[in-house]
Amino acid sequence: MDWRLFAQQMASMSRELLAQDSVDATLEHITRSATELVWGCDAAGILLLHGKKVETLAPTHDLVTESDRLQERLAEGPCFDAARGDTDERVFRIHDFTHEVPRWPQYASRAKELGVGSMMGFLLYTEEEELGALNLYSGHPGAFTEDSETAGWLLASHAAIAFSSARSQAQLEQAIATRHLIGEAMGILMGSHDLTEKEAFDVLRRFSQDNNIKLREVARRVCEHGSLA
């Protein structure tokens, strides 16, 4: 195991992650890097958990999506547990699916039928938030070694920071775009109905509340049609 080479590859990956221009591009780079940098990894994906509903992001293979759906149906599995983040564990690993897996018996028997031989799940988190789980799959039993687990954990640590940064940037850009959109809609109402800035905003806000429509969408309607009608 050449850890010096791995460190150089991680440094290059980290720079490339920060250079991505969207959240989706960042996540796709993370999962692709997992298949390239973690020994034994044939496929990777990121799982987000919304209550008991699973969302799969940037899967590199259909196997990832099928596994996530299976864990959602059964409400059990290493990726499911990793994404919950409600324990002190940060890494979940099934070394060999040909052996009995007492912790996740229903999932293990069905995952083997999907073609999973071994897998690992890593919680993606920063000090401020938990983001889901990075999940790595192999079609071969016993494919992941201790070195693989260490490499996966290092990758997940870098990935969490990049994911959080990309999402924060996207949220900021959306907030700015929303502010501009609302300002444009207010200007239209002020000009067409001789309203003050406050009155125009109140019109948008009341329509949003009365009709249970997000303020951004109300503003978009005014900008596209010139009125709330």
Image (spheres, rainbow, N blue to C red):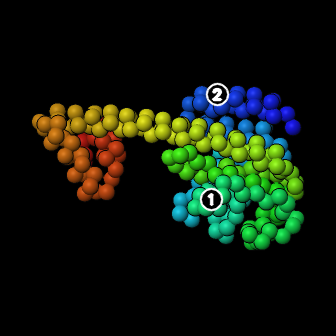
Q: Are marks 1 and 2 in contact (CB under 8 Å)?
A: no
Relative image position of residue 71 (x, y in whole percent):
68, 64
Q: Residue at x 64, y 27 (%)?
A: 15
Question: Which residue is painted at 78% across and 38% down in the image?
Answer: 37
Q: Quadrant of residue 111?
A: bottom right
Residue at screen point 84% across, 63% down? 97
Residue 224 visible at all: no
Is residue 88 rendered to the left or right of residue 139?
left
Any part of residue 176 in sight: yes
Task: Describe residue 99's horizontal placement relative to residue 84 as left or right.
Answer: right
State which quadrant residue 227 falls in: top left
Residue 212 x/y as whole percent? 31, 57
Task: From the image, tell me which residue sits under label 1.
Answer: 88
Which amino acid is tagged 1? Asp
Secondary structure state at the residue bearing disc 1: loop
Question: Residue 78, position in %: x, y?
Answer: 70, 61
Residue wearing tag 2: 15
